[in-house]
Structure formats: C-alpha cells, structure tokens
Image (cartoon, rainbow, N blue to C red):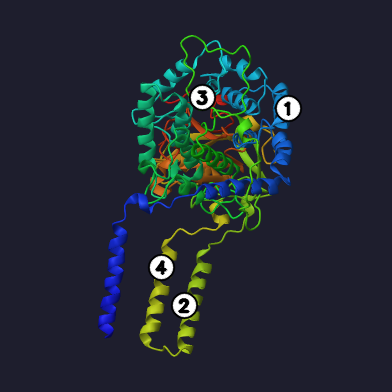
Amino acid sequence: MRNKAHISFLCIVMTLFLSLGCVPMEAQCSEHTAEEVADLIGGIVDYKLSQCGAGSIEEWLGGSIAEGAGTTSDWYALALSQYGYSDLSAYERALTEYLSGNNVLSATSREKYALGLAAAGSRNSYVTDILDSSIGEQGMMSWIYGLHVLNNGYTCTKFSTDSVVDTILSLQYPDGGWALFGEYGDIDVTAMTVQALAPHTGRDDVSGAVDRALDFLSAKQKDNGGYESFGTPNPESTSQVLTAVSALGIDCRYDDRFIKDGHDLIDGIVEYRLPDGSFCHTHGGGTNETATVQAFYSFIAFERMTEGRSPLLVLDNRVLPHNTEEHTGSVQPDVQQTTAASHTESKAVSSARTGTVTTSAKTTSTTSLSTSASAAAKTSAVTVTGTTALTTEKLSLSNRTKGSAKPAVIIVIIGSAAVISLIIFILGKRSPKNFLFIALIAGAAVIVVLLTDIRSADEYYSGGKKDKDSVAGTVTMEIRCDTIAGKAEHIPADGIILPPTAFDFEAGETVFDILTEAAQTYGIQVENRGSAGGAHGMVYIAGINYIYEYDFGDLSGWVYHVNGITPSRGCGEYELSDGDRIEWLYTCEIGHDLDEVYEK
C-alpha cells in the first residue's frame, strides 16, 4: 500500500509538472493591474511626503519641489504635471528665479529646464531662447532633449523637428542602439532616444529605426524582466525602457518582446522597491533618489499609455507663444494631445507605505572589491623635496595595529565544531563517524581559510605600496574633483584627492588595478560595481572619497583619462603602458565640462 501511495503521489507531481510546462509564456506573466501600478505611484508619493513633511501633493509642490527647482526636484515636478496636477506656479517662479541667478553652462541642462518650464505652463521665453544655442551642442543627449522641446510645438531658427530627427537617425549604431560614445548601443541612451522619436513613427525611416532599437532592447532584457548597466542590474535602465515602450503605445504586459521567463518590465523595476515605497539602485542597497524618481515617472508614463494619453514628455500644460510657427521643412508630430483641464481632478493617492521611512539619498552598498576607509580620513596634498606625497588627517596609516584575521576565523571554526560535537554527544548520537565527519568539515574549512587571502581593514589599507616582482614600467595617477571643489565638507577645497603620484605596474595591470592600489595605500574610499578579479573589465566606479555619481546632478559622476584621452573601454579593460598618465576626474556634465577628447 505504501509503495502504491508513493507511486500515486509521484504521478500527480509529474502530471502537474508537465501541465505547467505546457503553459504558454504569455500565460506565465503575472499581469499588473492599473490599481497595482497606481499603488506603486502612491507609495513613492507617500515616501516623498513623509520625507519632506508635507501633508499633500499640493503642499509638496509648493514646498520642497519649489525649493529644489533647478537642482533636485525638476523630474518630480514634470511627472506630477503629467499625472494631473496643473498648478505648478510655485515651482515655475522658483525655477525662473534659479535661471535668472545662474549661468547654466550645460546645453542638456538648459533643455531640461525648458521642459520643466513648459510642464509648469510657463510663458517664459527661455523655453525657445535656449534652443539655437543648445540643440546638438553637447552630443547625443542635447539632440534628444532638444527634440523633446520641439516635439511640444516650440520652434527655433536653426533647427526643425525633421532636421533634428534626421541627425538622430544618422547616429544610430549597427546593433540598433544609440550611445554617448563607443562602438555599441547603450540601453539607457537607446531608450531615451526612442522616447524622443516616438511622436515621429509616422515617418518610415523613423519607424524602421525604432523597430531596430526595440529589437536591441528586447535582446538585452534579462530573465527577471530588468536590465543591467555596466554589468550591474538596476531599475533605472528598466524605467527608461518602460517609459520608451509606453511612449510608443506598447503595453509591456502583453508584448512578447518584453516578457522574459514570465517577467515583464514592471517586474524588473518592482524587485528594487523598498518597504517605505522608495527604490534602491542595487539589490540590498538603501533608498536611491535617482532610482526612485525614474521609477515614479516611468509608472506615470505607463499609466498614461493605458489611458490613451500622450507620451510622458509631450506635455499637457505647455502654453505656446502666440507667434510660434513651424519652420519650413518641418512636420509637426502627430501626437495625441490631452489637456490638463480634463484631468484637473485630484488623484486619490493610495498609501503603500509600510515600515520605517528611509531618507538616505545615496546607495552605499559595496561589492567584493569595494574599498572603504573611515570618513575621518580626510586627504590633503603636501610637497616633500620636490615630489608630491599624501598625508591624512586624524588617521595615521603607519601607526595602525597590524594583525591577521585568520587566527580569529580558525578559532571560530574550531569552536563551532566543538559546540556541534557537544550537542551531538548530548543527543546520544555518539557514533565515531559523526565526530569524524565534523572533524573533516572543520579541517577543510581551516584549510580554505589558510589558502584564502583574508585581510582586515587595517591590513587592506596598508599605508605602503605593493612590492611587485616583475615591474613592467611606471605610471602616474591623480584624482581630482575641480568641478565641485569645496562644495561640501568632505570635498577638498582645492579639488585634489590624490596629487600626481607614481606607481609601478606589472604586465597586464589595468587602470582599475592602480586605482585599487592607491585606495589601499593612501586610505582613499572607492566604491565600484561590476565583476571582479580577472573578469573585471565591466567595473564601474560609483564613488571616490565619498563623492558619488548623481551627487551633483543627473549627469554627474567619475570618468578617467589616460594621457589626456577619454578611453572607450572600462577602467578594468585598459591595460597600462610605461609612462601613462592616469587622471580620475569628477564631471557634472558627462565629461563635457572637462573638455574631453574621446579615443578613436
């Protein structure tokens, strides 16, 4: 009877397994309802209201969003405008004041502010005044944002929508994508380009280019429905793709191209959601403002698509100047226009917040090769007999207590084995085989520890350069943040984090290897993302000296130069040659504020 029961159970399990295996892929995709997406939007709103102490969206718009105009809140203002909140007067006044008091050097930023003013229903001539001097002036992104402004009916003398579309099409890569530089398409840039081209798919050449771009994006999608950037899974790239396909009227829940292993784009974003409604940049990380705001507007873009409304960046509240006319040779995009008047009713924002609100604006999770030092280790450059050296304040590397962590780990292993043996003895399981097995496991663990390079923080930050057996040459490296010098307590007033310093290198070592050595030698905090060891070609440097990407705007972060050139390879791929001069520099404008020269 028992055997028959077992056989019957196995038959039932096998039947269920085969039945599930025959279900079509579409059926395996869990459909996200409109209510669920509304809850995701509401959760972000609740998080932001709690963060700024506002009691309503109107209070948020008139308070912290207005206060952050031009710096931190512009995307929230635009998204809320497209979500049905038409009174952005406080934000408009604040942004106008910001622009009158600041000389905005970045062409892309000028275009973004123009979109912000348009979303607020402003009649400020700034929207059109900046177009001639901004479109195409900062590479790919200035073509994209410039086209977004033109898509809303604004005009200028030098460019028409058709001429900008033509230029963007000419920049498409053979793989179907677009990128800022390099030989291959980039997911984020491709998705943002598709967003700008969406109103023009009535043109055959645009339709073909967009189809190739969608094939590129579909091929890059991961099994969880999301995407990776520089080898790191993240929600921001997925948010850009969701915004793009929504602009085209594509519902990602039902399009096979954007369903992988039963997961769609919304799944790829939601897995980064935190209990307080905000979003993190990497799994296990804390709240990240960039991830949160991009998730916010991508969900709104999706909702607008389901309601048959215009793309996210075809703005409801725009007010065109009376004398605006489309210039010769330009065709106004055929887009659905829904005015804000039909959506003036307040949105009922449901609460999706659980747990404690987290207000950290920075992801601080580290990978296995991330290096960190005490925040007390502030750096300053001094000159000693004609050469530049580095000293540290409040932290003496030479006085650190040296000691290995291995003995402590081995003691823990042996102690654990003893405790387990005692428990087994008390339970009466006193067979010699049991104790022999425990001894073998403990012995194997000890051997692994002895063969593994385990170092404490004190050992890692050695305070001395590595002794290298086969020196292939010498390079110099410096780390600077001149673009933000003195803007915060932890940022050096002169912008120098590491002055020009010589490092020996062995054959095959890369820019990343020397950066890691500098971090170990001089106690400089470095946070990197991507794979490590022999496969660290995709390493991406997120932060140095506690200065992170996005800290000073959407286009800010770390870049590196070798001999004055910006390489098209990652820092883990660039192998060094004798005499190379390495610079790590912080940019606020994706390198254009550094007068970059790109590798051919």
Relative to residue 575, is residue 382 drawn left or right? right
In the picture, the disc for residue 93 is 1
Q: Tag 1 or tag 4, which sits nearer the N-term? A: 1
**Distance in Å between CA atoms under marks 2 and 1:** 69 Å
Looking at the rendered structure, the kind of residue marked 1 is Arg
In the picture, the disc for residue 509 is none
Residue drawn at point x = 68 percent, y = 48 percent: 376
Nearest to the eye among marks 1 and 3: give it.
1
Q: Identify the residue position indicated by label 2 in the image.
A: 417
Looking at the rendered structure, the kind of residue marked 2 is Ala
Nearest to the eye among marks 2 and 1: give it.
1
Quarter of the image where one finds residue 6: bottom left
**Distance in Å between CA atoms under marks 3 and 4:** 50 Å
In the picture, the disc for residue 596 is 3
Q: Nearer the viewer, residue 476 or 44?
A: 44
Looking at the rendered structure, the kind of residue marked 4 is Ile
Q: Identify the residue position indicated by label 4 in the image.
A: 447
Q: Secondary structure at mark 4?
A: helix
Nearest to the eye among marks 2 and 4: give it.
2
- 10 Å crowding of disc 3: few (<14), some (14-19), many (20+): some
Nearest to the eye among marks 4 and 1: give it.
1
Q: Secondary structure at mark 3?
A: loop
Q: Tag 3 or tag 1, which sits nearer the N-term? A: 1
